[in-house]
Image (spheres, rainbow, N blue to C red):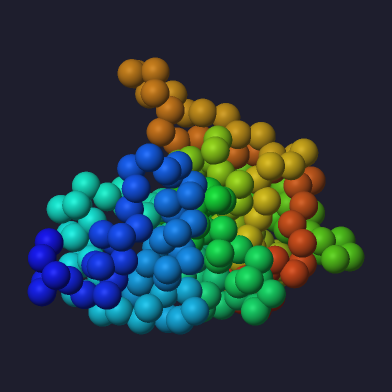
Amino acid sequence: MTAVEMTPADAWLDQSWDPEITVAEWWRQLADARLSNPMLPEPWGRGWSRARAAAFASAMVAEGVLGPPAGIGMVLAEPTILAHGSPEVIERYVPQILNGQHAWCQLFSEPGAGSDLAGLQTRAERDGDEWLVNGQKVWTSGGQWADHGILVARTDPYQAKHRGLSYFAFPMRQTGVEVRPLRELTGQAMFNEVFLSNARVAHADRIGDYNDGWRVAN
C-alpha cells in the first residue's frame, strides 16, 4: 500500500499491526482506535459508511491482518444494547464486546417456539433487584463458550403473546445454567440446548422497557 493510497486509518493499520502480539492485545488496539466496528457512532466507532468500512476490511485482508471480533456479540448484542440499553448497560457491556473479551450467544428459540418465537414459554419472575429465569432454549450456537446471552423471556403471562416479553443481557456463567451440546452425525456440536433453573439476571440488565422485548428483539 503506497503512501498516496493510504487514509489515516490505513496508515494506523500499517504502523500498528504486529503478528507477534496476542489476539487479545490486537483486539484491544482495534477497539481503542474505534476500528472494531467503525460504522458505529462515536465514541464506539467512527461513523463510517458501509463502503468505507468494507474498504478498510479489504485493506486488512490484503495486509494479512487479523480481523476484529465476530459473532453474536458484534452482530446482535452490541447494536441492540446501543439502541435500547441504558447508559450504564452500554458502558458495562459494549467495550468488552468490541475488544473481544466477552463472547455472547442468542437465547431466543425454544423447542416449542422456533418459527413462532412469540410463543416462547421461558419465564422471568421479578425477585427484588433480580429476575429468576426458568425454561429451556435450543439451537444456541456458542452457548458452551459464551459469557453472556441475549435472552428473551416471558415476564407477564397474562399479556398477549407478542406482549409480555422482556429482553435481558443474561450472564451465562452461573449456577442454574446448564448447556448441553446437540451432537451431529459427525460428532460435532454446532448448537446447544440451554436449561435455565432459577438462574438470575439483574433488573438493571434489562434491555428496553418492561414487556417490550418483542420490539427490541425485532
Q: Is residue 81 left or right of residue 22?
A: right
Q: Viewer-proximal residue, 81 or 42? A: 42
Q: Position of residue 198 (x, y in %)?
A: 79, 46
- Residue 82 placement (x, y as % from top left): 52, 75
Residue at 75% across / 69% down in the picture?
204
Quadrant housing residue 211: bottom right
Residue 146 x/y as whole percent: 56, 44
Q: Which residue is pictured at 60% across the width and 34% down the height? A: 179
Q: Quadrant of residue 124?
A: bottom right
Q: Which residue is nearer to you in this view: 24 or 141?
A: 24
Residue at the farthest right position: 128
Q: Residue at x 31, y 66 (%)?
A: 12
Q: Which quadrant, please, contains the C terminus?
A: bottom left
161 w.r.t. 65: above or below: below
Q: In the rendered view, tell whether residue 116 sits above or below residue 78.
A: above
Q: Is residue 85 left or right of residue 125?
A: left
Please identify the quarter of the rendering in which residue 132 is found: bottom right
Q: Is residue 7 left or right of residue 214?
A: left
Which percent across, then down, holds residue 206?
68, 68
Q: Nearer the viewer, residue 58 or 125?
A: 58
Front residue (pair 114, 169): 169
Q: Is residue 109 at all visible to an observer of this figure?
A: no
Q: Number of labelled discs?
A: 0
Residue shown at 60%/63% (left/top)? 93
Q: Could you tell me if residue 178 is visible in this image? A: yes
As drawn, is 45 to the left or to the right of 193? left
Q: Quadrant of the N terminus?
A: bottom left
